[in-house]
Amino acid sequence: LGMSRTAMRRRRNRRPGWLGHALVVFPVIVASGWLYLHLNKDVTLVVDGKTASISTFASSVGDVLDGYGVLVGPHDRVAPGTEARVADGMAIRVLHAKEITVVLNGRSRTVYVTGSTVDDVLEHINVRLRQGDVVEPSRSASIEEGDVIVFREAVPVSVFIDGQDRRVITNAPSVAYLLDSMGVVLDKRDRVTPAADSELVSGTRIRVVRVQVRRVTEQAAIRYGTNVV
């Protein structure tokens, strides 16, 4: 009751001052929450089959990969592309390419593939296996960086030996390999054309000539003259 009018004015003025600050701070908190909810995205990152669930503020797929240290080379596959915008719930898939050496019918080449099996490599280089073709390792075998895959196509050839002309379809890499697989035993004097280490191609004609050395003894009358001195 003894409170002065000035003191009452001061007490009344305290509440509006607090409310004023509250009205300023509240919108800032609300705005920050709104930005977090709308800029933060939950993304599934799959790298070479390994999955991770992440949260990111990145705007593009490339930024996500950079942020998590995922290096991407020119032969790697990224889906969606690195320029694609990130959306909540998106799945980003990365397949790193492997450098593989493929020996096709004796000729070597290097390929970069993102598949995981020998069959994937053959599909990548458009090779279709036919009956008699050989691929090593097997089509279902898994591949790793630096692996070597050998493919030999079966080809028709002819072999003339011991008076017989035989036609065969083979995946043998050379003349010697084919003759050995046919059970042909060669003597060191036998002649083979083309040379035993020659590569087989479609239409190759192989000729084996047996060379035998015999000692032959014959008796024959020899004409002679007689000189008397």
Image (cartoon, helix red, strand yellow):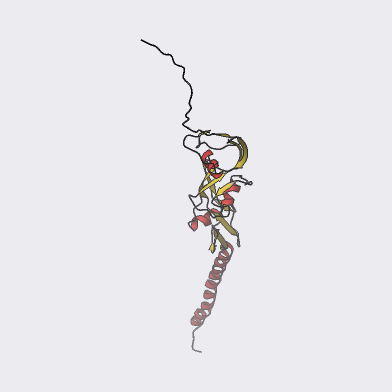
Q: Quadrant of residue 151?
A: top right
Residue found at the far bottom of this picture: 1
Residues 56 and 146: in front is 146
Give the camera-side residue of 151 and 206.
206
Most distant residue in the front direction: 228
Question: Which residue is found at the position 52% from the left and 72% from the top?
Answer: 21
Would residue 119 be found to the left or right of residue 73 on screen? right
Residue farthest toward the left in the current orientation of the protein: 229
Frontmost residue, 155 versus 103: 155
Figure disc tally: 0
Can I make out residue 29 in this image?
Answer: yes
The quarter of the rendered structure image containing the C terminus is: top left
Q: Is residue 60 visible?
A: no
Q: Residue drawn at (53%, 70%), measured in percent from left and top?
A: 25
Residue 170 placement: quadrant: top right
The image position of residue 122, as x and y in percent, is 59, 47
Q: Position of residue 105 (x, y in %)?
A: 55, 41
The image quarter containing residue 125 is top right
x, y percent for residue 90: 60, 60
Residue at 48% x, 82% y is 7
188 vs 125: above or below: above
Q: Is residue 90 above or below residue 30?
A: above
Q: Nearer the viewer, residue 33 or 118?
A: 118
Q: Position of residue 172 (x, y in %)?
A: 55, 43
